Amino acid sequence: MRLGDVFVVPLRVGKFGAAIVVHTNGGHSFVVIDGFWDAPPRAEELRDFRAMPPPFGETPFPGRAHVFKGWFDGDIPPNFQVVLSGPLTPEQESMSGYQGTMIFQSARDFARTLSDQWRWLHDHEAYMQELDQRSARVERAREARQKSLSLESMLNETFFASWADTWPEDRLAEARQIFTDATAKLIALRANGTPRKRAAELRKIVDAFNRLYDETGLVESVERDLIVDRITELASLVGLDNAGEKLTRRRTW
C-alpha cells in the first residue's frame, strides 16, 4: 500500500472497518477511520471522514492527537482492499508521526484489534465478560504450572506459541532450541555444577538471542519480556535469581 491509500478491513464480527495510510517508511502507519459498515464501504463513503478516537476508551497523552493510530509491517492480506487513493491533507500529514501509535504484530493483528473495538463499543458487556473469563483461565493455568514447575517440565513444554503468527517457522524453532539446549545443560549441571557454571549457561541464552536479534530484528517488547521471564524461571530452579537483570543485562534486544 502507498501513502494516501484508504483501505477496507474485514472484521471477524462480520463488519468492515477502514483506515488511511499516513506513513510508509518501514512498514505502514495509518489512522483508523471512524465508523463500521455492514458491507465493504465504497470510495464515496470514505472521501470525507473523521478519524476514530483511541480504542477502548483510552485517553492520549497531552498534546497528542485524539485519534486511533497504528502501525504494522509485513504482508498485506489480499482482503485488505484499497478503495481510494490521493494526497494527504495537512491535517492527515500532521498525524504521520510515531507519537501515540499502537504497534501491531501484523496486519491481521490490527484487524483483530479493530474487531475487538467494535465489540467494546457495541457488545460491551459480553466482551468484558469474555475478557474476565479469559484472564481467570490464564491465571488458573499459570498457578497450576507454577506448582509443578521443574527443569524437566520446562524442557518438555511447548513455549512461545503466540509467536507463530509473526515469526518464521525456522526462527521460532531456533529460539526454542536455544532454551531447550540451555535447560538440558542445567539438568546435567544439577548434580555437581557450581553456581558460576549455571549462571554462565543462563548468560549464554542472552548471547544466543543477541545473535538472533542482530540477524533478524525479531525480538520486540513482547518477546523480550517472555525471554527474560523464562530465563528468570530457569534461574529460580537452580538456586539463582535475575535481580537487577544481573543475568540478562548484556542483552541487545
Image (spheres, grey):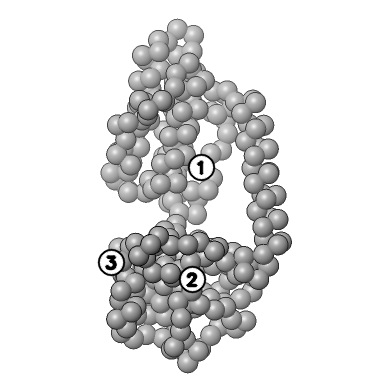
Q: Amino acid at mark 3?
A: Asn
Q: Residue at x 65, y 71 (%)?
A: 122
134 in relation to 73, above or below: above
- Residue 47: image quadrant is bottom left
Calculate the distance from the C-alpha at mark 1 to the C-alpha at mark 2: 33 Å
Look at discs 2 and 3 and give the one toward the viewer. 2
Calculate the distance from the C-alpha at mark 1 to the C-alpha at mark 3: 29 Å
Q: Which residue is mark 2?
A: 53
Q: Is residue 121 left or right of residue 29?
A: right
Look at discs 1 and 2 and give the one toward the viewer. 2
- Residue 224: image quadrant is top left
- x and y, in percent, of residue 55 in the image: 52, 65
229 in relation to 124, above or below: above
Q: Is residue 73 left or right of residue 152?
A: left
- SS class, disc 3: loop
Q: Residue at x 40, y 13 (%)?
A: 195
Calculate the distance from the C-alpha at mark 2 to the C-alpha at mark 3: 24 Å
Q: Amino acid at mark 2?
A: Pro
Q: Amino acid at mark 1?
A: Phe
Q: Which residue is mark 1?
A: 160
- x and y, in percent, of residue 50 in the image: 46, 81
Whether residue 77 can be seen here: no
Label 1 vs 3, first from the N-terminus: 3
Whether residue 159 can be seen here: yes
- x and y, in percent, of residue 153 in the image: 59, 27
